[in-house]
Amino acid sequence: MLEFSDAEIGALVGSFLWPMFRIMGFFLAAPVLGSNFVPIRVRLILAMAVSLLVAPTLPPVPALDGLSLTVMIIILQQLLIGVALGFFLQMLFQLFVLLGQMIAMQMGLGFASMVDPANGVNVAIVSTFYLMFVTVLFISFDGHLVMIEVIADSFVQVPIAATGLDVDVYYQLISTISWVFSSAVLLALPALTALLMTNFAFGIMTRAAPQMNIFALGFPVALMFGLFVIWLTMGFFLDAAAGIFNEMFIRLRALLA
């Protein structure tokens, strides 16, 4: 008859449950897989399936009692690590939301907004267009598979323990926001420059002919010219998005390392 001690039972259960908590936290905050249009039941089933596949390949987990303070700390640490990694990737998609917001404000579409189905908030219509386009590109580049690979590799680089991530990692996570802003500005710079020149030309026309109704004339022209500039910039948008995806995953792996 097989006999197991409390520590052995805790290790067997923890070898599956603790990775599942980290993966569930990751799927809760990660883009695409953690979006609102993915049902919670589907996310839970997916987290359990990935945990079943990942658990046999992980390093040995610490053997602890089933109900202890250390176990609770480890569970909270795993949830925090998963949410931090998912939030790191979520900033990748917010980069393109910020890009659409800046272009929309310059071309006069800042008032036109719609509900983002992924996050459930109102964003500019241009941001929604970029977000849907980038989501399709992300899936076509197998970004969702890379996300699962990253969360699986995180158990090797950051083993399951009561310590979790260092404090410096969270500071690096916050500092990545500056990279998001700079990347969004670089992507929007061609469109912003062209629209700025258009507004500058309308300003000269207003000074030259004050009787001209610049608001009635400038808004449709700026709108059409903005759409034309967006169409022109789509030529290099694919390469730029691929470069940003690679940079984000490189930063994520460096964060774990």
Image (cartoon, rainbow, N blue to C red):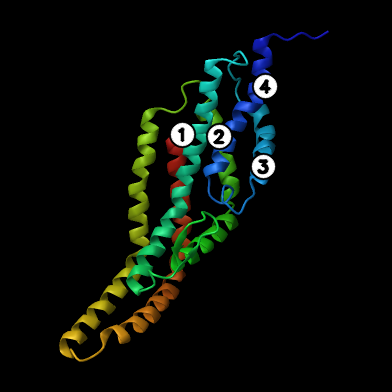
Residue type beneath disc 3: Leu
N-terminal of the pair, mark 2 or mark 3, is 3
Mark 4 — residue?
A: 13
From the viewer's side, name the closer residue of 181 and 248.
Answer: 181
User: Label 1 sits on what residue type?
Assistant: Leu
Q: What is the secondary structure assignment of the residue under circle 2? A: helix
Q: Which residue is mark 1?
A: 256
Which residue is the site of mark 3?
46
Q: Dot 1: few (<14), some (14–19), or many (≥20) neighbours within 10 Å? A: some
166 sits to left or right of 203: right
Quadrant in the rendering for residue 1: top right
| Residue 20, x across and y down, in percent | 62, 32
Pair 4/1: label in front: 4
Q: Marks 4 and 2: in contact by CB < 8 Å?
A: no
Q: Toward which corner of the image does residue 210 lie, by quadrant?
A: bottom left
- Left of 190 or right of it: where is 248? right
Q: Position of residue 73 (x, y in %)?
A: 51, 22
Mark 2 to mark 4 CA distance (whole Å): 21 Å
Cβ atoms at labels 3 and 1 below 8 Å apart: no
Can residue 152 be seen in the rendering of this structure? no
Assign a secondary structure to mark 1. helix
**Residue at 26% across, 77% down:** 199
Q: Are marks 2 and 1 in contact (CB under 8 Å)?
A: yes
Instruction: Measure the C-alpha gap from mark 4 to mark 1.
Output: 25 Å
State the CA–CA distance, disc 2 to disc 1.
Answer: 9 Å
First of labels 4, 1 by sequence position: 4
Amino acid of disc 2: Asp
Mark 2 lies on residue:
153
Q: Could you give the CA–CA distance between mark 4 and mark 3, rounded to whole angstroms?
A: 19 Å
User: In the image, what residue occupies the spot 44% across and 54% down?
Assistant: 94
In the rendered view, tell whether residue 65 sits above or below residue 141: above
Q: Position of residue 101 (x, y in %)?
A: 38, 63
